[in-house]
Amino acid sequence: MHKLIDTPMDEKNIGLGKLLYELRQDLDIYCLISVNAGEINKRRIAKSFFEHVQRLARSSIALNICKIFEEQKRGYELNSIPGVLHHLHAEASTSSDDFKLRDFIRRYHGPSDFESPISALQSTIDGFRDQHKVELDRFKTVRDKRAAHSEYGFADGTLPSYGVMEDFFDFGVDFYGLMHAAFIGVVPYDFKTGRKVKVSLKRLLQKLGLEAIKTEMK
């Protein structure tokens, strides 16, 4: 099959990558402040500032996860996973790297036997969304009632755990990488090395006097 460079699907997948990049930075900010909150509070170092930044990161996480998994709607083209799939159905019938496609389907518990790889990919993504429906609905609630709007009487709302946030991020990154490698035919962006915000925030905490800075959630 021909590679899908410069097609609408390629452009949408690039847009999805930008959302994932933003989410990665949000997660790193939220994580780094959370795991070092005890030392920040104990030393009284810009406590109110870091609490505010943590709340902003929390709202942005909910917004971006919802954007990444938002369903394509008539008249609105989205840089979401469903938005990319919408064009994949129209522009491709198979992949140029069947191994990577089958590995993605296997890793996320998709159908083990199939004739149409695109349909199997769709089933895999639908299965992931169904499996995580409760958590995704919680992100949507915070987005709708707090982050995007301000509903009277609504408290902050409880988001799923940080581990669940990372699960949604990992799935999005794996899907984005699969599209680039197996359908578009180019090397995807490496999100593991694009952690400049985390590095900068760690340096800031060091300059403020924190020692033995924690960098990961336990």
Image (spheres, rainbow, N blue to C red):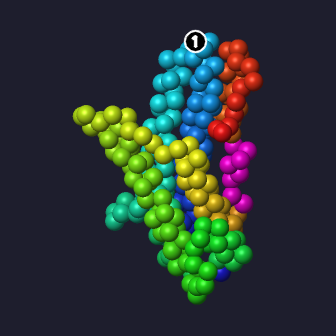
Residue 213 drawn at (x, y percent) = 71, 26
Residue sitting farthest toward the top: 44
Q: In the displayed structure, would residue 140 be above or below residue 180?
A: above
Which residue does the numbered mark 1 point to in the structure image? 44
Q: Quadrant of the N terminus?
A: bottom right
Residue 45 drawn at (x, y percent) = 59, 13
Q: Residue at x 60, y 62 (%)?
A: 175
Is residue 98 something that shows in the picture? yes
Q: Quadrant of the C terminus?
A: top right
Q: In what element is the residue under mark 1?
A: loop
Is most of the magenta stretch helix, strand or loop? loop
Q: In the displayed structure, would residue 56 be above or below residue 142?
A: above
Instruction: Categorize mark 1 by other alpha carbons within 10 Å: few (<14), some (14-19), many (20+).
Output: few
Is residue 92 something that shows in the picture? no
Number of callouts: 1
Q: Residue at x 47, y 32 (%)?
A: 56
Q: Nearer the viewer, residue 196 or 32?
A: 32
Residue 6 drawn at (x, y percent) = 59, 64
Q: Residue at x 55, y 53 (%)?
A: 168
Residue 187 drawn at (x, y percent) = 72, 60
Residue type, numbered disc 1? Arg
Residue sitting farthest toward the front: 218
- Say whether residue 192 is magenta: yes
**Residue interval drawn in magenta:** 187-194
Q: Which quadrant of the structure image shows residue 216?
A: top right
In this rendering, position of residue 194 left or right of residue 153:
right
Q: In the displayed structure, would residue 190 be above or below residue 46?
A: below
